[in-house]
Image: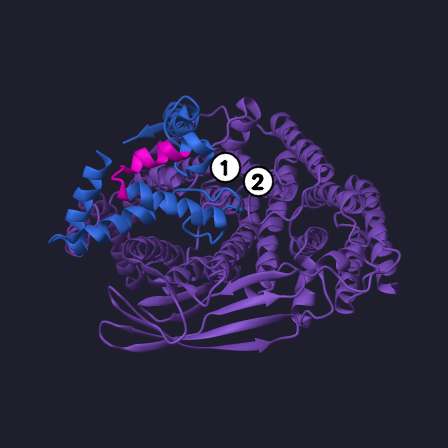
Amino acid sequence: MKIFKIILIVFFSLGFYQLKSDEKTAAIEIKILKNIRCLICQGQSVHDSESEFAFSIKQIVKKKISEGLKEKQIYDFLKDKYGEWIVYDPGFNKNTYILWLLPLLLFFLAGAIMIKKLIFKK
Amino acid sequence: MLANQIGYYSLLLGLLSSFLLCIVSAKDFNSSNNKINQNILSLSFLQLMLVVVSFLSLIISFVNSDFSNETVFNNSHTTKPLFYKISGTWGNHEGSLLLWLMVLTLFIFLFLIKSREQPKKYRILTLLFQQIIIIGFFLFVLMTSNPFNYLFPVPNEGLGLNPILQDPALAIHPPILYLGYVGTSVIFSSALAAVVLNYISKDWGQHIKKWVLVSWIFLTVGIMLGSIWAYYELGWGGFWFWDPVENISLMPWLSLTALLHCITVLEKRNMFTSWVVILSISTFTLSMCGTFLVRSGILNSIHTFANDPARGVFILIFLFVLISLSLIIFFIFQKKNYKDLQLFWLSRETSVLINNWFMMYFLSVVLIGTVYPIFLDVISSEKISVGPPFYQKLITPFLIVFLLLMSFVPRLKWIKSKIDNKNSLIIIFIISVMLSLLIIKNLKVDLLFNTILVSAAFFLFFTTLKELFDKKLNIAQTLSHFGFSLLVLSILFNSILSSETITNIKIGERYNYSNGEIFLKRIEKKKESNFESIIAYFEIKDRNSKTIELKPEIRIYNQPKTITSEADIKTSILNDKFLVMSHVKGNEYFNIRYQVKPFMIWIWTSVLLISFGGLMSLFKKKNEK
């Protein structure tokens, strides 16, 4: 299966759409790397870091992309290995319901309070 | 040595003058005299001078590289250039707190001079509240962060300043930002004083608006300077990272911006009194929380240079005292307005309300995004990162609505109004959508979403631009709003159109990338007083075979031993060409990163326009009197 995949990828990368698909993978690679925290740096993404850790992660991501993994699968793989902390985009799960919903809730609550407390006239 | 002693004792005397000031002003508070006791002014001036002397003596210790002083030892080095010896004074925890303290005393003195036509009791009470903050800071500095600790035996050499802090923009970034932060303390104190004396009124609004404007201008420019520094010094070409410490400077800014809008309603219509007080309290609290979170080392960030739990505990207690004090005062003294507020849907009042509504939403996103990971870690010891994607997802949809509203709502008049020039608005809107569609369609990005976003920004851009040419009353406001639309547009196009190339290259090699060719001509080694540098000469040819030369640098600092990459940037009206390099371990190759970043200069210009609008508003007020 793996060999089949690699052959498929090699076939496509040699094919007619060589440049375009290359550009696309490069863009996805950068997008992924920007979304991964360099764990040994202070507030830097892997993309922006030149540490050895960042270097090895870059290799892993490259490899995973060439293996044909989707963006989300790569994040899941990294999360399994290094924990949720490594991804800058916090997923929507039981740990982050409050994080995502509280600001929205506050917005609508504030709106409701304004309409209730103040009397608006046309 | 001598400077060290003078600095320490004048700090002690400064604290003493605080207590004296409190006693004298408490006595004067109930005296029948209509004028404020002259001694209060003299004492306040004396206090300012004592802190200035203390600060100057710290600078002198830094200039003389007096390593018997612990702060100097930890943060300076004899080979450092004079300029950075001086700026190193506030490039560390102790010195920066002394700077805070100096600005605190400076501002209360200015307040006393500038508020002569205000009621005496109000002035004295503001002074007293400000002295509570000042005493807190004196104690904090003296007890946990004394900049004049004595070292024996005296070391021969210091540990040096972190090289990334040795930079002109970073030399002025903290003082400017602090002027903004500390300005909010005056707003805080005077709001509390005005609540106690039931003086929240049109007069007070008019008087305090100047302070709001001044703090807001400094805060805006201060944040921008930090951003510029991050852009060229941290070496990866971004200018805003949603890093916790950046967020922390943004929070008081959002709150202060809401206050700036709200205060106009108080000034003109004597409404929203309680809300103005709440915003005054929250703005200062957020500034203080900023200091606390940065200094305590809770946050994992490039800015953190102090990790001392004792300091954290002190600020936490101090913060707790200030917040409870202000809440108690607010709930006891603030007169309840039982009369229902009646507003017309289309009125200036409602427009300010909407502005505040959105500002508070943006604030809550930033606040929750910054502190939620800390709480989660404490409660469930699970670590998550909240980075740029979170903020972009929650802020952008609301920003679109905000931009659309901002295009016509600020033109509404007080009390009751209608929308003027509906036709021209519709025409401008259609033009904006068409223009955005034309631009976005040719780019490889999500068409629908980006078109909506860019259209909204263009809509604001064109409406404010048109207004600038109208003989409208409020040029200051329009200019700031125009600046905001320009800022949003520049950031959007910058993020959509930026391109970058990363490769390894050695001397004499040519590298072809999709848009041209990069050629590393030669490298040159240089030796400065506190670092050695490797300068590389690159020639970059783009598709139109225009050649530019860029000279990025690698610096090897001696103390502390650090390697930094200095980017070289060619700025033009349309884009910045940004090149940074680093050494690849173990061979002759250099890793380079070449970026073309459109409209960078417009990002800075638009922030300057926004603050310039504030400046105009400040001087307009003065002329009217």
Q: Mark 2 Cα within 10 Å, few/some/many (few <14, many 20+)?
A: many
| Image color mode | by chain
Image height of B83 relative to B317, above or below: below
Image height of B442 relative to B538, above or below: above
* Chain for numbered disc 1: B
From the rendered image, report the letter of the chain displayed in blue: A
Name the kind of residue labelled 1 in the image. Answer: Thr
Q: Position of residue A95 (x, y in %)?
A: 44, 24
Q: Mark 1 Cα within 10 Å, few/some/many (few <14, many 20+)?
A: many
Residue at point 39% right, 29% down? A100
Q: Is residue A76 magenta?
A: yes
Q: Image check: B361 left or right of B322?
A: left
Of B174 and B476, nearer the camera is B174
Q: Position of residue B206 (x, y in %)?
A: 53, 49
Of B162 and B347, nearer the camera is B162
**Does dot 1 land on a helix, a strand or a loop?**
helix
Q: Are marks 2 and 1 in contact (CB under 8 Å)?
A: yes
Q: Earlier in the sequence, mark 2 or mark 1?
A: 2
Q: Which residues are magenta?
A: A66-78
Whether residue A45 is visible here, answered yes or no, is no
Image height of B113 relative to A81, above or below: below
Q: Position of residue B101 (x, y in %)?
A: 71, 51
Of A94 and B601, nearer the camera is A94
Question: Which residue is labeled 1 in the image?
Answer: B370
Residue at point 27% right, 40% down? A67
Question: Which residue is labeled 2 in the image?
Answer: B299
Whether residue B612 is visible here, answered yes or no, is yes
Mark closer to the observer (2, 1): 2
How would you classify the magenta stretch by its main secondary structure?
Answer: helix
Residue at point 65% right, 67% down? B84
The colour one sees for chain B in the rendered image is purple
